[in-house]
Amino acid sequence: MNLQQKSKLVEELFRELEEETSEFYRQGGLSCLAGCGFCCANPKIPATPLEFLPLAFDLYDKGLAEEFANQLALEEKPGNCIIYRAQADDEKKGFCGSYKHRGLICRLFGASSRKNSKTGNKDLITCKILKEKFPQEFKETTERINSGFPIPVSIAWYTQLHDIDEYLTTQYPINQAILMALELVLRYKFYQEGEVVEQL
Ligand code: SF4
C-alpha cells in the first residue's frame, strides 16, 4: 500500500469516527466551549505521523507543505501545534486552522472514553476546564457512558489506526508528528513526480 492509499484509509477512519462522535453529541454528550484552544495550546500533545497524513497531503496540494516543514524543522523545542491559530491576547483561546484535517487525538479528546484500570468503568477523556465548569454535567455524562450511552472508545480507534501502519503510529509531540508526515509526503511526491517525468 502506498502513502496516498494509507492517507485515504485514515480519512475513511475519520469519517466513521465522526459518525460515532455525532451520535455522542446528538444524545447530549459534553462538548467543548466555543473558541477554547486550551488543548491545542499544549506542545506535548502526543500524536502519530499517520494521523496527520491527510493534513500533509492537503498542505502539499495547497503548495504549503515545504513552507510548513521548513518552519517546523527550525523549532528548537516543541511548540504549540503549527495548525493552531491562537488569539493574540490569549494563547489558550483560538481555533484549529485545518479542522477538517485535524488528527485522531484532536477528534477523540473530549468525545471518547477509556477504561479505568482500577474500577473497570469507562472514564470520559476530557479537560480540566469542562470538569471544573460543568461538574454536574461531567458527573451525569460519566454515569451515562457507563450505562450504555454511545461514546467512541479511544483504544479501539487507535487500534484501527495501528492496523493501517504499525510503523507510522509511534507517538511524538504533535509538531514532530506533523513534520514527519510532511517529510513523508514531500518524499513520496518527489519520487512520484520523478516517475511521471521519466514516462514522458
Ligand atoms: S490539529 Fe487542530 S485541533 Fe488538533 S491540536 Fe492542532 S489546532 Fe488543535
Image: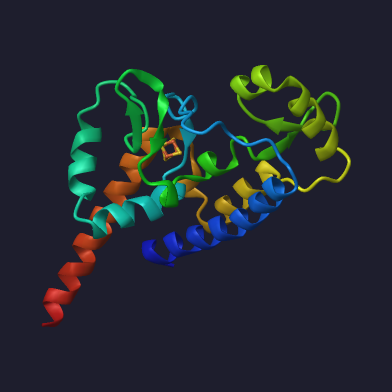
Q: Is residue 152 visible?
A: no
Left or right relative to 2: residue 69? left
Residue 152, above or below 139:
below
Q: Quadrant of the N terminus?
A: bottom left
**Residue positioned most to the front:** 34
- Residue 45 screen position, x and y as percent: 47, 29
Which of the two residues, 90 or 124, is positioned nearer the viewer here?
90
**Which image quarter: residue 3?**
bottom left
Which of the two residues, 89 or 145, is positioned nearer the viewer here?
89
Residue 184, above or below 84:
below
Left or right relative to 108: residue 84? left
Q: Residue at x 50, y 54 (%)?
A: 165
Q: Residue at x 23, y 49 (%)?
A: 65
- Residue 16 screen position, x and y as percent: 61, 60
Q: Residue at x 42, y 25 (%)?
A: 93
Q: Quadrant of the C terminus?
A: bottom left
Colour style of the rendered protein structure: rainbow
Q: How many marks?
A: 0
Residue 134, above or below 108:
above
**Which image quarter: residue 43?**
top left
Which quadrant contains ligand 1?
top left
Which of the two residues, 2 or 85, is positioned nearer the viewer here?
85
Residue 106, above or below 140:
below
- Residue 79 screen position, x and y as percent: 33, 24
Q: Residue at x 19, y 73 (%)?
A: 195
Q: Is residue 195 visible?
A: yes
- Residue 112 screen position, x and y as percent: 67, 40
